[in-house]
Amino acid sequence: MITRRVTFRLYPNRRQQDTLHYWRKMHCSLYNAAVYNRKTQYQKFGHSVGYLEQQNSLPAFKEVWTEYKPLGSHALQATLKRVDFAFVRFFKGLGKYPKFKASRRYSGWTYPDKQSWKAHTTGNNGDLELANLGSIQMRGKARMWGTPTTCTITYRNNRWYASITVQCTPTRETGSGAIGLDLGCKDAITLSTGEKIAKPDFIKEGQQKVKVASKKLRHKRAPNRNKKIKASRRWRKERQQVSSLQRKVARQRSDWLHQTTSSIVSSNSLVAGEQLNVRGMTRKGKKQKRQKAGLNRSILDVGFGMIGQMLEYKLAESSGFYVESPTKTLKPTQRCAKCWELTPKTLADRVHVCSNPACQHTEDRDVNAAQVNLIWASGKSGYQGRRSSPSAPRIFQDRGVERSSLGAEPPSSTLCASMKQLGALKRQKLALQRSKGE
Ligand SMILES: [Zn+2]
């Protein structure tokens, strides 16, 4: 069983829309109140407030502010949990001190369990039933459907969405082939078979349109808080135009990524890629700010970071493997796919000609790199490939998060436990009390 997230668009009627907005505002107020509570308690009394203390004060809080009752107690707890997550992030040194949030920009709320909501659907359109609100029409399609577990309501770009997590066992058809990949700026993806997948045109076209719209926006009256200038109506209109164009490009890009990766997975059960440090590659140079701009732009255009992630989970669904070669030690662009010798190259050298006099293997640079990745992955070179498995998520290895803190240890009061773990803890306690009472 894997957890998958499916997002549906909601179509609330006028009355439901008003209620949803009101609830979002109330969740935001609760969030801010919880942050304020932690802040002042510490500043004035030196007392650090934890999640459980805030959760236990909720019933008394609802007696005073009765308008919070229809929101569902577990949804309110989940909002307090968001505050807890923000503070734990801060204490770990991963983020800044939690800020107060504007209700205008507050995203939404979560139902952490199956209470207070029901999804009347089998993965293709349907209705969402919320307690104290009624049934809302929703549209969307899931590739796989199973048992719904949690539901998050979000509001963005003037639209309402329901993001539902589902427990399911996704499957995917795949062939028996094995293929190597090389990601580049000239052609987006080069396969070890010699096939090249070009960068799609819509990205450039979309960027051109965004550029034109942004220029128009610059000529309108922008808001300035210090000078107390309000944004003009034309500026606001044009800004909406810019953001809608940007969103369109983002949608097209993700669609292209999904189609390309799915087609690769459909005929190959072993895919060999390379480790990419996208953040390092796209970061601005310290002295020469424009130095890497070209490379940066084309990397972000295609969404290289996403390709690896998508291939990984899609291959896991088809019980195949995605292997990443260590780019720094393997050096796939410089290594020869035939004799395994290194030939130094610059970015401008487009053809690999082996410097080993006994070999002199000549091949397209990117195709050679893809072949090297494949050979490394299939273990022919004596190296051992790393299997892609759900137990070792790639992101944790990449970002250097210590894995010992992720699950192995039992949740302690100082550690930030998830809603699920908290529930289990509570049930454990209750069972203990019951056995003592008997
Ligand atoms: Zn060679």
Image (cartoon, rainbow, N blue to C red):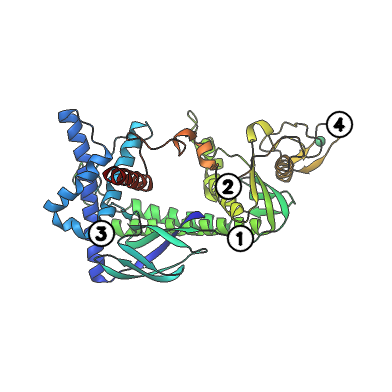
Sooner in the amino-acid sequence: mark 4 or mark 1: 1
User: Observer-nearest residue: 35 or 134?
Assistant: 134
Sooner in the amino-acid sequence: mark 3 or mark 4: 3
Residue at disc 2, CB closer than 8 Å to ligand 1: no
Residue 357's disc number = 4
Question: Which circle, 2 or 1, is nearer the viewer?
Answer: 1
For the residues bearing labels 1 and 3, Cβ distance under 8 angstroms: no
Residue lying at the far right of the rendered structure: 358
Coordinates of residue 169 in the picture (x, y in percent): 54, 58
Amino acid residing under circle 1: Arg
Question: Which circle, 1 or 3, is nearer the viewer?
Answer: 1
Q: CA distance from mark 2 to mark 1?
A: 17 Å
Determine the secondary structure under disc 2.
helix
**Going by the image, does 50 lie left or right of 395?**
left
Measuring 30% from the left and 41% from the top, which residue is drawn there? 84
Sooner in the amino-acid sequence: mark 1 or mark 3: 1
Local crowd at mark 3 within 10 Å, few (<14), some, or many (≥20)?
few
Residue 233's disc number = 3
Q: Which residue is mark 2?
A: 308
Q: CA distance from mark 2 to mark 3?
A: 43 Å
Amino acid residing under circle 2: Gly
Coordinates of residue 128 in the picture (x, y in percent): 35, 67
Question: Which circle, 2 or 3, is nearer the viewer?
Answer: 2
Residue lying at the far left of the rendered structure: 64
Residue lying at the far front of the rendered structure: 438
Q: Is residue 147 above or below residue 211?
A: below
